[in-house]
Image: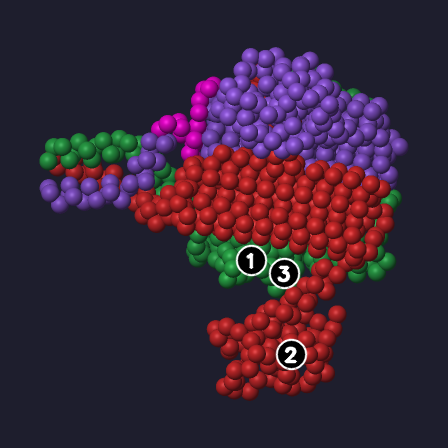
Chain colours: A purple, B green, C red
Amino acid sequence: MEFTLGQVAAILNGKVVGDENQKVSRLDKIQEGKRGGISFLSNEKYTSFIYETEATAVIVSNNFTPIKEVKTNLIRVEDAYTGFTQLLEAYAMMMKNSMVGIEEPSYIDASSQIGEQAYRGAFSYIGKNCKIGEAVKIYSHAHIGNRVQIGNNVIIHTGAKICADTVIGNNCEIHPGAVIGSDGFGFAPQPDGTYKTIPQIGNVILEDNVSVGANSTIDCATMGSTIIKKGAKIDNMVQIAHNVIIGENTVIASQTGISGSTEIGKNCVIAGKAGIVGHIKIADNTTIGANTGISKSILKSGTTLFGYIAMDMKKFLKSYTIFKKLDSIEDRIRELEKKQ
Amino acid sequence: MEFTLGQVAAILNGKVVGDENQKVSRLDKIQEGKRGGISFLSNEKYTSFIYETEATAVIVSNNFTPIKEVKTNLIRVEDAYTGFTQLLEAYAMMMKNSMVGIEEPSYIDASSQIGEQAYRGAFSYIGKNCKIGEAVKIYSHAHIGNRVQIGNNVIIHTGAKICADTVIGNNCEIHPGAVIGSDGFGFAPQPDGTYKTIPQIGNVILEDNVSVGANSTIDCATMGSTIIKKGAKIDNMVQIAHNVIIGENTVIASQTGISGSTEIGKNCVIAGKAGIVGHIKIADNTTIGANTGISKSILKSGTTLFGYIAMDMKKFLKSYTIFKKLDSIEDRIRELEKKQ
Amino acid sequence: MEFTLGQVAAILNGKVVGDENQKVSRLDKIQEGKRGGISFLSNEKYTSFIYETEATAVIVSNNFTPIKEVKTNLIRVEDAYTGFTQLLEAYAMMMKNSMVGIEEPSYIDASSQIGEQAYRGAFSYIGKNCKIGEAVKIYSHAHIGNRVQIGNNVIIHTGAKICADTVIGNNCEIHPGAVIGSDGFGFAPQPDGTYKTIPQIGNVILEDNVSVGANSTIDCATMGSTIIKKGAKIDNMVQIAHNVIIGENTVIASQTGISGSTEIGKNCVIAGKAGIVGHIKIADNTTIGANTGISKSILKSGTTLFGYIAMDMKKFLKSYTIFKKLDSIEDRIRELEKKQ
């Protein structure tokens, strides 16, 4: 898809300095700009690149004053970063999310409903008694199980699996290969050492504006619901066990795992590879560092934790500094013992 | 699906105290009971909820004696927990596992056989020369590769991938997105720094009653078989490398990884995010804590290990307690040094 | 597929000692040899097995001299290991990678091209404007998004997802369930505590000879490209975030995670479950131990790192040895304090 600089300026409510008939088809970083691409200059750190970039055009703020000759075309807007973001969104919308219509073969049970402006990719599957809203995009190989409810403007990417009875709000995005509503890991030990499966009959509820990353897994509740509250953002390969509750606007980075029945507050930030045991509560606004193990409830809002078994982050780092030189610590003790 | 309390009592061989014509369609926790749901009271801790629950009915044991007025209907049975479990299983069976028949389009090569009472979801795939038993459910987008053998009463959930030559016993359940029999990670370093792929021609064998969680991966053996013995239960996103053997009734929680050729004994319990190196043996009845790193064989049955590099769990926790105050330990040494 | 020993010897340019009309259909380890299988003897450690193996034949090097009676048939070749490897490759090629042709239903948009000798499994999906080379195998349920480019001799296994705009070189192998080109995890915090999605409009480039393991995820760049350079080998369930660059011939084991914009050098070896923060550089030839946390750039080529927060591996192990006995360390300090 190509646009003239004139068209781009019109979209951004800006002004071309240069040739408004030149065409761009790509968004580039300014330091990697190439012919046919458009970049932006917002951070002063990158100013030097504007004098040498090969990009066809650069979006700059009205207050930008070049200190030497600029060879590229400029598009002047009120704020370059905001302008570029607008362009980015328009571009992403066109390139990535413009699919509409039904590709065949796709499968939808006669008992299910889906709203207007839907996209259903080839080999997408919708089971029995589903209620799906408007402008929902269901990519190829996505699976929507029986009795699933989905709101409006939801994207279910390729190969995502929305298991039976899941409820999804508006504006959610489920990335490729994610599994929502798989059975919780519940087995009752028997006297002979074997395990008996405990039926998992609950479901998963994703409230509005939730994002779930590629190949993440969110298990259904044993009874009741595993709940991801509105605005929570979950990265790739995150494991969320049965009956967990994730608070509003909490962000969880890749490869983190949260065990059963734990309740995480709102506006928390959990870095990658963290591990959180089951049946505890994490207060609102908690920050959990990468690869941190949380073994008990965090009661105080706003703390920052880190470590193999989580501690106050600064204290952990202090201890770790000494851990690194533990051999010399032992030497000093040995020295003291000798001198007695 | 709705049932009258009279019908429920008949299933459970119990007796209704209240209105046996009222209907229920859901199982709820007693503390979350709502009209139309049925709960149970088994743990005394929850007794107070029976006097205020909005559940339409509560299953109680015959020996339950209310100490004040109960407004909900009761179903009296010999043991409330057992009764509820029966109901749970019946419910799960009806809601989750009642699919039978063939949805089209689905794919099965003419050379493959599948037994009676099968479910084959739309877009499920069965390759060449497969032998599949009775009452096997293969959900949408499940892939069964060439020459796979599957026993009776097996559930292959949506998007699970059973690669070529895998052998699966009876009563196994493979959850959504799991990959069984992908190639092992084997590469031979070449003099020029590149790597050459070592062909992986073995397979995976899952014995009876094995469960594999969502998005877990079990690689085939380089030669011979990767074996998951009967009754082993594997959670979501567990990685099992080529030629690993997992013993009977061993339970492995989410995000654990086991490297190539390691052999794990029977009745072990491995918590989440554990990491086990290759080519070692873990004795029967070993308990491995969350996020524990196992770098050498465990020879003694019945030990409990924990830690970044595994140690006896109690010893690790003792050391970690001191780790937490290492700065004060260094202060004390400094103090001693000054006083000499 | 069965071969006579005479046929095998012809393939290997070797000589049968025994009955060249006997047939084999399987490759076995010598210690697990059974009738109908062929094994090899290369490592002297296994010599004793040749006198008792039940394998129909064993490949040996010309310089092998039995010290007692050998009951099995022998195939003598110049070098037994090389001979066996040849056989292994031929076998793997026949059994695993011999699929050719189109199974229906499969989906390819009319605007896309695919070369000769292709395999397209049932329910495989190819979107708009894709360019796909010769001898590419696309298994069932694989998804190729819009505008994807793929070279020659590439295998896309079942259920792998190659998202829009990805570029894949020659001789790559993408294992089942892997996701290439999912959106990066980018969200801009808003004043009200919510997050706004940052469009991810870049792509992923896999150069030649790259392998990506089952259920791994590689996110597209926010802008520009996430790049996996030629010959890199990535195991199962590895997470690679947006804008990461992985150098040539670098090997990354299972469950490792690499955060956004980090650049890893060439010929590195990264063991399982390592975690690497974003926006750093790792020098060429770096070795990173299992479960190691890397929090800052590694500048010096050829170092070996290990630990919860990475250190020189030997130093970490020394410190950990003392960590294990920290309680006795504290006892010794207490003793010293008493004696003052």
Q: CA distance from mark 2 to mark 3?
A: 23 Å
Residue visible at 59% across and 25% down?
A71
In the picture of the structure, the residue carrying the numbered disc 2 is C13
Mark 2 surroundings within 10 Å by alpha-carbon count, few (fewer than 14), some (14 through 19), many (20 or more) = few
In the picture of the structure, the residue carrying the numbered disc 3 is B200
Residue visible at 83% across and 50% down?
B107
> Image quarter for residue C298?
top left
User: Which one is closest to the eye, mark 2 or mark 3?
Assistant: 2
Q: In this orientation, which residue lies closer to the viewer: B323 or B154? A: B323
In the picture of the structure, the residue carrying the numbered disc 1 is B195
Numbered disc 2: secondary structure:
loop
Query: In the image, what residue type sits under mark 2?
Result: Asn
Q: CA distance from mark 2 to mark 1?
A: 26 Å
Asked whether the viewer can see residue B303, the reply is: no
The span shown in magenta is A300-315
The chain containing the residue under callout 2 comes to C
Mark 1 surroundings within 10 Å by alpha-carbon count, few (fewer than 14), some (14 through 19), many (20 or more) = some
Whether A301 is among the magenta residues is yes
The chain containing the residue under callout 3 comes to B
Q: Position of residue C61 (x, y in %)?
A: 55, 79
Q: CA distance from mark 3 to mark 1?
A: 15 Å
Asked whether the viewer can see residue A37, the reply is: yes
Numbered disc 1: secondary structure:
strand
**Which mark sits nearer the N-terminus, 3 or 1?**
1
Q: Is residue B23 left or right of residue A8?
A: right
